[in-house]
Image (tube, helix red, strand yellow):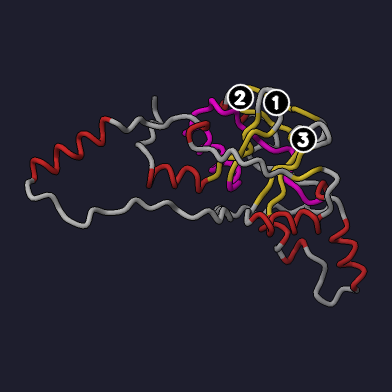
Amino acid sequence: MFSVYGVMGRLFNGPLDQMQQVGGVNTLTRSRAVARIGQDPSSSDTGDDLRRALPTEAPHKPIAAYAQVQVGATQRRPLSRVSEVMSRQLLTLGLSATVLQGWQFLCDQGIGQAPVVNEQGTLVGMLLRADLLRAEHLPAPHAHPLAWRAWLAQPVAEAMWTPIPSVQPDAELRHVARVLLDSGLPGLPVVDAHGRVAGFVSRSDLLRAIVNDPPLDLWS
């Protein structure tokens, strides 16, 4: 199940095929201060990949090696749902935060994006660090210092993506991949039935699951 949230509340709740018919979702809109949309397919997730250690010595008998692999395979359960790969660390920005506060938060946490929530904790948008670095969104280098101060003092509502698609924990991973491809976003906020943020699922989470975790059952 997917939802779309904006500053006016939940705009859509339903399956992926219906969400794709909602205007403005596949080419997400921003608020007034950031008019142009740049789609950066790379994620800024800075989490380190977990790497499995390779055995230092090969088994002496090929049959024994095959048996060992088979035992490991029987213990691996395919992953197919968002809840199995998502990050449950709650890193959100308040709607009243300034661009400067948002930038500092992203840098301090070492993340490339953060969901933005209102006073009730409901999702309203998402702030991307890559957008704040784009030259076309910044004051000119020769601009008066007051212009830079004004830009940093504006609320994140003026620079965030909104409305923003979100996903619930029981959604299928292949549907999440489809939304990420269509929207150009590096990840999606994971919300509960009331729109409260429960975590985040990123492209890095999907890739990390492919490399390090049990097989992804994308077509179950």
Which of pointers 2 and 1 lies earlier in the amino acid sequence?
Answer: 1
Camera-nearest label, 2 or 3: 3
Which amino acid, mark 2?
Gln
User: Which image quadrant is residue 140 in?
Assistant: bottom right
> Which tag, 3 or 1, sits closer to the chain's start?
3
Q: Residues within 10 Å of mark 1 (few under 14, many from 20)?
A: some
Going from N to C along the chain, the mark reached first, 2 or 3, is 3
Q: Disc count in the image? A: 3
The residue shown at (75%, 64%) is 136
Name the residue carrying label 3. 6
Residue shown at 91% from the left, 74% from the top: 144
Say which mark, if any, is on residue 18: 2
Which structural element holds mark 1?
strand
Quarter of the image with the N terminus in it:
top right
- Residue at 48% across, 33% down: 84
Quickly name the residue at label 1.
12
Residue numbers of the magenta segment: 158-186
Is 71 on the left or on the right of 22, as rendered?
A: left
Q: Amino acid at mark 1?
A: Phe
Hey, which residue is sitting farthest bottom in the picture? 142
Image point 41% across, 32% down: which residue? Answer: 79
Q: CA distance from mark 2 to mark 3?
A: 18 Å
Q: Where is residue 207? Give x, y as percent.
A: 44, 46
What is the CA distance from the residue labelled 2 to the residue labelled 1? Answer: 9 Å
In which image quadrant can residue 147 be found?
A: bottom right
Establish if 101 lies above or below 187.
below
